[in-house]
Amino acid sequence: MSVEKNTQPTNPESESSGDPRTGASPRAGDSPRIGVDEWVAQADERKQARSGFWGTIANRWETIPVFWRIGFVAFILILAPIVTNTTPVLSLLDISNNDFMVRVGATFLAFSILAIGLNVVVGYAGLLDLGYVAFFGLASYGYAYLSSDFIGAGVHVPYFISIPVVVAFTALVGYLLGSLAIRLYGDYLAIVTLGFGLLFFQLAQTLTRVRFFWLERPVDLTRGPNGINNLDAIPLITSRIEESIAYGYIYLFGSTFTPTIKYYFLFLIMLGLVVLVVHHMNQSRLGRGWRAMREDDLAAEVMGIPVRHLKLMAFATGAGIAALAGATFAAWQGNVVPIRYNVLALINLYAMVVLGGLGSLPGVIIGAFIYTLLPEILRNVVYATTLFYVGGLIGLVAWLEPSKRLVMVLGGTFLAGLLLKFLVNLLWPGFDTGVAPTEGFFLNQWAQSWLIIPANFTTAGNLAIGAGIAALLATVSIKNWWRYVFLGLTIYLFGFAWETRLAVEPSVTRILVVGASLVVLMITRPQGLLGKLRVEIL
Amino acid sequence: MAILNVDRLSKHFGGLLVVNDLSFELNEGEILSIIGPNGAGKTTVLNLLTGINPPDSGDIHFQGQSIVGLQPHQITKLGMARTFQTLRLFLNMSIIENVMSAAYPHTKKGLFDIIFRTSGWRKEEAQIRALAQESLSFFGERLVGYRFDQPAYSLSYANRRRLEIARAMATKPKLLLLDEPAAGMNPKETLEITELIGQLRDKGYTILFIEHDMNVVSGISDRVIALDYGQKIAEGSYQEVVENERVIEAYLGRKQSVWTKA
């Protein structure tokens, strides 16, 4: 059989010659290189996508060396609790101390650590672990057993022993749980781990009368739904040193040193260490193995990566990180209650990780930041109103870019509002006489200067929410210039709804706003804020 | 010297006997190709060799050591690497990371070195990167330079096949198993793959490959094995095998039956 090997003139160099970036072929007559330049073309598209106002900001930020970027964020996080505790800032915010702010900050840091641990399991290793929150809880109970009055006359192991012990123990439990579920993939693994999470929660609530055969009376292992109280606090190195630091702090900053600030910095240091360790793990053969098995675990196994071992490592690492946050969190709160470790807590953690972007450390931290701070900020009418208008403006700028359209929409809405108010007052005196409950803050006053507030604003406000959602849907579904008319209408209606209804009931509104922000963010960026869009098959 | 010794290997899935009493030897530095019609059990043979499926009976000796019962990553560590017929790249990882991840079996640095980035870890990491760059530069300029940090999904089909081979090379194998390396390639690329397999042999790899494209098989094989219904029906040089009556029968059907039907 003859082989038609040399009948075809081939030029092995033709495909790789020339600069693919320019797409130009050095020699005329070369056949078009289908596929080769495909990626290059896509790269240009992406570059264009990052131009414009926000793209410029993102590009400018990325020109700063990584070290300075991290340093900048760390600097802000370090200074935040100190600066907000100085007299000028306190009087500006009209509060007597910043304890609440620091507490929210410490919660954010604790949840960032937890989210990073979850990110190792879900983001890097691709194991859908729905039992993650149980490790958080297990570590809290572990700390309670080791460092409180709970067992016997009280076991008070110092924190520098009890926390490492708890972390090691929880990592071991993670390893063992992993080895039970090791053969399972995706959804099946999710259900098994979910079962573990539910078991833990249920046992924590019900193990109040456990009978051991060698004991006469039943033993209370968890104190049920009330949980265990009076856990040992973590002193700053030792209680003596903490005392002197507290004096120094008062001397330096003129304000009281609270335990909250101490835990804030403790969590900050832990976050720094966890970020460093996880980053190093990810940028090594271990992290490459994790990501490889996330992509295709059979191919990873055949390429010599011990998938089973790496899965267990991921479970153990995630559990260990959760334990670090869990034990410290319990020490800070001084108690453990089962309700803190329920499925809702798990969903919150997942929301943080997915919102920030699976697999991205800065993304996950930003996700935790937004998800922790947003509901807290929305408790206060003034902050919430500021966030509403500033956030709305940023959203509009992000969508329309600083352009003529943006000015037209904003100016048009404002002028139309003024005109409408003028006409209504002229033709129908007595209609625009309502007094919105939010007036007082300058943004509220400004908004009410061009909004009509009828006497019966409660019903009108409720209707405006529905109409506003309808107008928003019209805005996103219409493609011609009418969309900008509907956009103006949306702004007007939501402004009205905010002034009359939403800002008045923060307890309801904050959840609504969080939900709406999640919907909008995930629709506009399905990969999360800093995540990479994943391609499954191409 | 035989690097691979397959002895009376059998495997069935349910009631279907996929590999039936298959024995063959592979000498060091040799290029052996396995041909056969669709469903002849060629890919299953590769799956048995790499430990993805355990054989029902029979034995496989790789460099004198029995590898039956070992896990795939252990077999890879011993020096056997493969590519897949249906490409299985780590699509969302960068091109260089795809290759670097395959350096896992012959690197050792543990958790301590990784977390503290010791000098040993740095040295090993530099070695891994150099190895990956070397494997990728085997394919000329296609997968090097600015391409290193691009995700694997951005590659064209032919380049994905090349990346799979580069990834397999990074495991530092002695024996390369290629599952239809020319599938889906155009004639020019097929020719190039043929030359490439020769170059791989010159680099010191022993090669076992499965192929449908007879141009590749004839161009490069030292020896050919033909399979049908999991059984070896012919073995020898390309010329011998394609002239074998049973092989022609397996591919084209029995002459006689044509007459009986008509």
Image: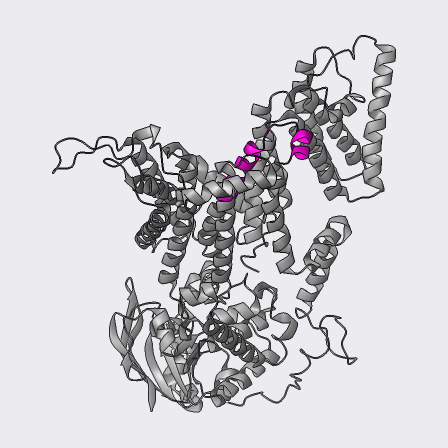
Q: In the rendered view, does B180 fall on the left or right side of B231? A: right
Residue B262 pos. (x, y %): 42, 73
> Can residue A321 be seen from the camera position used here?
yes
Asked if residue A110 lies in the magenta stretch, the reply is: yes
Judge whether residue A98 is colored magenta: yes
Using the rendered view, name the quadrant where residue A482 is placed.
top right
Position of A289 relative to B227 (above/below): above
Segment tinted magenta in the rendering: A86-112
In the depicted structure, whether residue B151 falls above or below residue B191: above
Q: Position of residue B146 (x, y in %)?
A: 65, 71
Q: Quadrant of residue A196?
A: top left
- The colour scheme applied to this rendered structure is one colour
Residue A15 in which image quadrant: bottom right
Q: Is residue A12 above or below residue A369?
A: below
Q: Can see residue A350? A: no
Nearer to us in this view, B220 or B110: B110
> Along the horizontal axis of the image, is B134 left or right of A459?
left
Say whether residue B126 is left or right of residue A15.
left
Nearer-the-camera pick, B134 or B223: B134
Secondary structure that dominates the magenta span: helix
Q: Is residue A285 above or below residue B249?
A: above
Image coordinates of residue A162 in percent, x first then y, are 34, 47
Q: Estimate the x, y position of residue A323 in percent, counting from the top left.
A: 39, 47
| Residue occupying image coordinates x 57% and y 60% | A538
Residue ranking furthest to the top: A430
Q: Nearer the viewer, residue B198 or B185?
A: B198
Q: Residue A260 or A442: which is nearer the viewer?
A: A260
- The residue located at (55%, 61%) in the rendering is B92
**Residue at screen point 60% across, 74% down:** B143
